[in-house]
Image: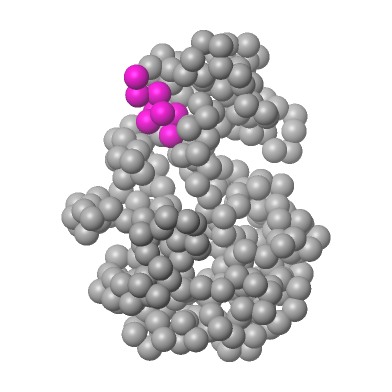
């Protein structure tokens, strides 16, 4: 479904090249064919092992099974990806040394993996800087309690930034956080999850809020309840503006968002929102004096 949405997005917005993060544990069997044919549609392509996602019950892999498969695939496909994240099997505050063993093993196989911070309070950041930043300069901030609280995560982010790192933020795209720190990239699955609830994200330039994101609800059923934080599209005050934005950028209409392919088109619209949000965030970061790579 994800690759299908990507192709539809690129067909409708050919001038917008998205940055794409894929999980090895969730890759389709036809991935290599897809990359050979469509890699040029993407601005950047990033690989995650998926070891966090397989913690869920019913996963088709165990971590022990995933590691050698991920290592072989990453070594063979290293030139297809702009970044490959480390195989972080442990997520606690004291997990750095254990995860470093996997990092060293993958680096020895010729895979320049991205180290991940799981302790923003003490230890991890200093160890990564002392070991030396990788050639790609990227360091990720992963699972850690308090990491989405601006004042708690700011010291770790600033220490990495001042050391010359490009910072990736795992699993969160909270605007008020990302736009106020020198975070180079982030990822989240909300672009597709929102469509599952009939929600389409729209950056409303006429809003007077700092975060101008608005969530429009396009229900599948007539009497469906609008999710918390959403607005029913039929009573939305800026519906005409949204329609013009949708038509101009994707050639879509409101009937497309409530028709037979509603989830596909809602996902495409949400993908556009995140692509455009990258520039909004970069402008805000530069206004704060941060040097943000193009």
Percent of width and height locating residue 115: 53, 76
What residue appears at the point 48 percent right and 32 percent down from the top-left corner?
A: 195
Q: Quadrant of residue 223?
A: top right
Q: Is residue 134 above or below residue 46?
A: below
Residue sitting at 66 percent across and 53 percent down? 178
Quadrant of the rendered image containing residue 110: bottom left
For residue 78, above or below residue 130: above
Outermost residue toward the front? 58
Left or right of residue 249: residue 278: right
Tell me residue 33's x, y (percent).
18, 55
Q: Is residue 257 left or right of residue 167?
A: left
Residue 291 appears in the figure: no
**Residue 212: in magenta span:** no
Q: Residue at x 40, y 42 (%)?
A: 16
Name which residue lies at 61% across and 78% down: 95
Q: Nearer the viewer, residue 187 or 205?
A: 187
Magenta stretch, residue numbers: 260-267
> Would residue 125 be visible to someone looking at this image?
yes
**Predominant secondary structure, magenta span:** helix
Answer with left or right where residue 180 lies relative to residue 86.
Answer: right
Residue 28 shown left or right of residue 166 in the figure: left
């Amino acid at each position: 479904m994800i690759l299908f949405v990507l192709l539809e997005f690129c067909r409708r917005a050919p001038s917008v090249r998205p940055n794409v993060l894929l999980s090895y544990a969730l890759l389709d069997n036809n991935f290599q064919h897809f990359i050979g044919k469509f890699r040029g549609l993407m601005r950047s392509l990033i690989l995650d092992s998926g070891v966090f996602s397989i913690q869920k019950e019913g996963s088709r892999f165990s971590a022990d099974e995933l590691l050698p498969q991920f290592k072989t695939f990453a070594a063979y496909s290293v030139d297809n990806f702009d970044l490959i994240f480390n195989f972080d099997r442990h997520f606690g505050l004291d997990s750095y040394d254990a995860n470093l063993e996997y990092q060293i093993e993958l680096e020895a196989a010729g895979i320049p993996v991205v180290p991940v911070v799981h302790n923003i309070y003490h230890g991890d950041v200093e160890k990564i800087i002392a070991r030396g930043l990788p050639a790609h300069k990227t360091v990720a901030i992963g699972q850690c309690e308090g990491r989405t609280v601006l004042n708690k995560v700011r010291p770790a982010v600033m220490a990495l930034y001042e050391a010359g790192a490009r910072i990736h933020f795992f699993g969160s795209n909270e605007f008020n956080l990302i736009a106020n720190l020198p975070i180079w990239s982030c990822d989240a699955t909300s672009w597709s999850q929102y469509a599952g609830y009939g929600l389409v994200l729209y950056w409303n330039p006429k809003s007077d809020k700092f975060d101008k994101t608005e969530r429009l609800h396009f229900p599948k059923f007539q009497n469906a309840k609008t999710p918390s934080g959403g607005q029913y599209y039929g009573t939305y005050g800026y519906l005409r503006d949204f329609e013009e934005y949708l038509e101009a950028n994707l050639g879509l209409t409101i009937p497309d968002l409530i028709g037979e392919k509603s989830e596909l088109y809602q996902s495409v619209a949400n993908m556009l929102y995140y692509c455009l949000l990258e520039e909004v965030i970069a402008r805000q970061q530069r206004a704060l004096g941060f040097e943000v790579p193009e």
